Image: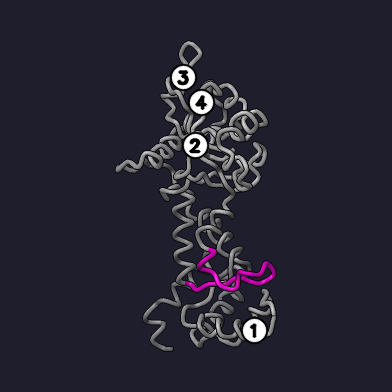
Amino acid sequence: MHWTYKLNSEFDLEQGDILQPTEYLTKNVLDKYHPYYSKHPDNKLYVVLTQSCDLVRRSGECKSDYITLAPVRPLSVIIKREFSQHLLNNSDPNAQPYGSNRVRGSFEDFLRKLFNNNDPHYFFIRKQEDMHIAQDMCAITSLSISIKSEHYSECLKARILQLEDVFQAKLGWLVGQKYSRVGTPDWDENQLNKEVEQVLSGEAVWIDDDQISKVNKAVREKSANQEVVGTEQLQQILSGFTSKKHQAIDAIFNVLISQNLLPQERDPSKHLLRKKLSSDPDFSQFF
């Protein structure tokens, strides 16, 4: 079980409970009162936003007359929503998207905030395949719907996971737009680097800002000839635009790898070192 989730569920509903859209909730509640949310293909799950104190049952009923829910969508959908407009060559499904390293930096900052739940618009939900969460997902805290508390017992039946108390508090802080930050454990830095690198490398090919205009021109020329620029074609284009500085960095990396000072495979430390060398003023003055 991921460390953001409780091993054992509580008796009552709580803020942050993750619900499946069961047949009952879909037909009797969502289809009837919130058809847009019910029919939206990306709304895979729902998370409870109502405060836990208002969901405690006394004499069989909770204090709140309504239970507020927010839709939960795949992380891939959120990434597309946030960054597709900043990537190039992404109109054709067979084409290889690419973007500048400036965009990559913004993308990396966004992912780090998202994974540690420091982005006010989203709440990250880690995949838990044995509990019917097959992929990383995000609750969209700015979107919410309310259902009557008479459906409380059905929400309990639909619950698949609960958040640990400290993450419930973090979700409450995000929803309430409070001014004090709720401290939650951050990801281990090495694990966070790997997660961010995996997402970044899967979304696009990242290109130095000083090369992006040349690449754009070459891609436009191929597109004008009705040629789809896929991964192989883009790599061919990039091979002709490698700057002297990055040729030098590649040579340094080859030596370090041959001496077993850097890993051969893809590794976040290699990207960080390349980024550091590329921006280092003492190193750059030779080029």
Q: Give the residue type at disc 3.
A: Cys
Looking at the rendered image, the disc whose residue lies closer to the viewer, 2 or 3, is: 2
What is the secondary structure assignment of the residue under circle 1? helix
Q: Depth check: give the residue in front, 90 or 233.
A: 90
Looking at the rendered image, the disc whose residue lies closer to the viewer, 3 or 4, is: 4
Instruction: Classify 111 as above or below 225.
Output: above
The magenta-colored residue range is 84-101
Residue 189: x and y, percent? 47, 54
Residue 24: x and y, percent? 65, 28
Residue 94 among magenta residues: yes
Residue 267 among magenta residues: no
Density class for disc 1 (Cα within 10 Å; few <14, some 14-19, many ≥20) is few
| Residue underneath mark 4 | 148
Instruction: Classify 281 as above or below 53.
Output: below
How far is the residue under mark 1 from the one under mark 2?
47 Å
| Residue underneath mark 3 | 62
What is the secondary structure assignment of the residue under circle 3? strand
How far is the residue under mark 4 from the one under mark 1?
56 Å
| Residue underneath mark 2 | 145
Residue 224, disc: 1
Residue 88: x and y, percent? 56, 72
Residue found at x 60% / y 87%: 240
How far is the residue under mark 3 from the one under mark 1?
63 Å
| Residue 125 in which image quadrant | top right
What is the secondary structure assignment of the residue under circle 4? strand
How far is the residue under mark 2 from the one under mark 4?
10 Å
Is the Cβ of the residue at disc 4 closer than 8 Å to that at disc 1?
A: no
Residue found at x 34% / y 43%: 181
Q: With 65 as the anchor, is 152 left or right in this view?
A: right
